[in-house]
Structures are given as C-alpha cells and as structure tokens.
Image (tube, coloured by chain):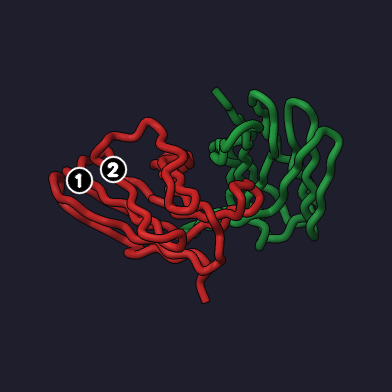
C-alpha cells in the first residue's frame, strides 16, 4: 500500500528564516509526486509535480526536490503569507491508477 | 468564475438523515473525485469517475453513493448518516488522471449531530 509521511507536523518560522519540509514515500512505482498548499477553509492548491529523482521545481520562494525515497520543499526567506498547510501526495504508476495518496501535511506558520 | 464548485459549503444534519453534496467543474476535465478530510486533516480518496464511469471505489461504506450524470458533474449521496461521517468532503477534477492537474473545490463541511 502506498504511504506518505510528512515531517515535521508543524513548523514555526520567523519571517526570513529559511527551512525545509520533508516528505518520505513508499510507492510501487512512482508516476509522480505532488506538492499542494492548503489554506484554512479552502481546498488544496496545486504547487508542483515531480516525476523522477533529481528533478527540481521552483516557484517564488519555494523549491521542491525529489530523491528515490523522499522529497523536500525548501522555503527561502519566507513571508507571513506563506503560512499554510503543505501537503505531499504520490501517484503510483501503472494502469488507470488515478488516485493520489496524501500525507497528513505540515502546518507552517511564519511570524512577522 | 469558480473552476470546481461544491454545494453546500456547510451541512449540519441529524443522525439517520440522507443528504447530498453536489459538485460541478467547468474546466472540461475528464476525471472527477471525492476526497474526505477527517478531523486530523488527513485527505483520503473515496471515489473517482472518468467520463461518467466509476474507476475508483475505495473501502467506503455503501451508504455513500456517487452519481455522475455527465462528465462535468459528480454528486455524493449519503444515506443513514452517522456521527463518524462528520468531515470535510472535497470534490476535485483532473485531465487524464494526472495528479498534477487536480483542481479542488473549496469543500463541504458536514457535521452530523
């Protein structure tokens, strides 16, 4: 069964204090690994897709990286508006497997 | 213009009642999903439809029945509601089943009392 474990569960940073979120996964053949952002009372919002080890994607202050066992979401010089829950999900390869398996998320709080 | 819209946003009902949640997407996507987010914020897939055909049916009680009248709509009907059904239910859609293309609705918070 596909599994996704995210750490830490919660992270509190000062504005400008860079850090990383971790996503460890177990999947029977990876089609893709995905990062989403979820704000309170809203649905998850897509950030990145990573398909193979060594791949990196960047968007503003966020950079996602992928190895064969885990992914990192690096946050450089965060701002208060980056506060949200960040979700990692995997999709297994093969057939018509459309489902995403999500981790429990990391709640990021950035204080001004 | 909302891409994936769910109604209602909030639903409070008594145990034993039957209720429905509606979802519509205007993105032209082929695949739609229902996910459940429990009190621990854990998102778990329930159902998926591709071009009106059921392709994923996770271990969900048969009190839950999805219905897709066309590929732009996926409704969720729940019979004999139980306290444990309280959660936030998210509808999502994607093109070709690729996870990166998932667009989520804003969720329906169901509270069973």
Do labels 2 and 1 touch, CB within 8 Å?
Answer: yes
Chain containing the residue with disc 1:
B
Residue at point 39%, 56% (across, down): B74
- Observer-nearest residue: B27 or A52? B27
| Left or right of B3 on screen, residue A31 | right
Q: State the image coordinates of residue A35 (x, y, percent, origin top left).
A: 66, 46
- Observer-nearest residue: A50 or B88? A50
- Observer-nearest residue: A23 or A107? A23
Q: State the image coordinates of residue A67 (x, y, percent, origin top left).
A: 80, 30
Can you see residue A47? yes
Residue at point 45%, 38% (across, down): B56
Chain containing the residue with disc 2:
B
Residue at point 27%, 38% (across, down): B84
| A65 is higher (above) or lower (below) than A76 | above
Badge 1 is on which residue? B79
Image quadrant where residue A6 sits: top right
Most extreme residue toward the bottom is: B1
SS of the residue under disc 1: loop
Q: State the image coordinates of residue B10 (x, y, percent, origin top left).
A: 31, 61
Q: Colour of chain A?
A: green
| Left or right of A86 on screen, residue B61 | left
């Amino acid at each position: 069964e596909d599994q996704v474990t995210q750490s830490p569960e919660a992270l509190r940073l000062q504005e400008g204090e860079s850090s990383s979120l971790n996503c460890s996964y177990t999947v029977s053949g990876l089609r893709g690994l995905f990062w989403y952002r979820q704000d309170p009372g809203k649905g998850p919002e897509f950030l990145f897709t990573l398909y193979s080890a060594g791949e990196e994607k960047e968007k503003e202050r966020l950079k996602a990286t992928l190895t064969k066992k885990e992914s990192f979401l690096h946050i450089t010089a965060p701002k208060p508006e980056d506060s949200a829950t960040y979700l990692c999900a995997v999709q297994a390869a093969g057939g018509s497997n459309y489902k995403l398996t999500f981790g429990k998320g990391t709640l990021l709080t950035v204080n001004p | 213009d909302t891409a994936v819209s769910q109604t209602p946003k909030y639903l409070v009902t008594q145990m034993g009642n039957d209720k429905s949640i509606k979802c519509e997407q205007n993105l032209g996507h082929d695949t739609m999903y229902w996910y459940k987010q429990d009190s621990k914020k854990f998102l778990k897939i329930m159902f998926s439809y591709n071009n009106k055909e059921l392709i994923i049916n996770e271990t969900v009680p048969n009190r839950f029945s999805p219905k897709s009248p066309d590929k732009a709509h996926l409704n969720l009907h729940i019979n004999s509601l139980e306290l444990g059904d309280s959660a936030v239910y998210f509808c999502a859609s994607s093109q070709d089943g690729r996870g990166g293309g998932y667009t989520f609705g804003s969720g329906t918070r169901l509270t069973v009392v």
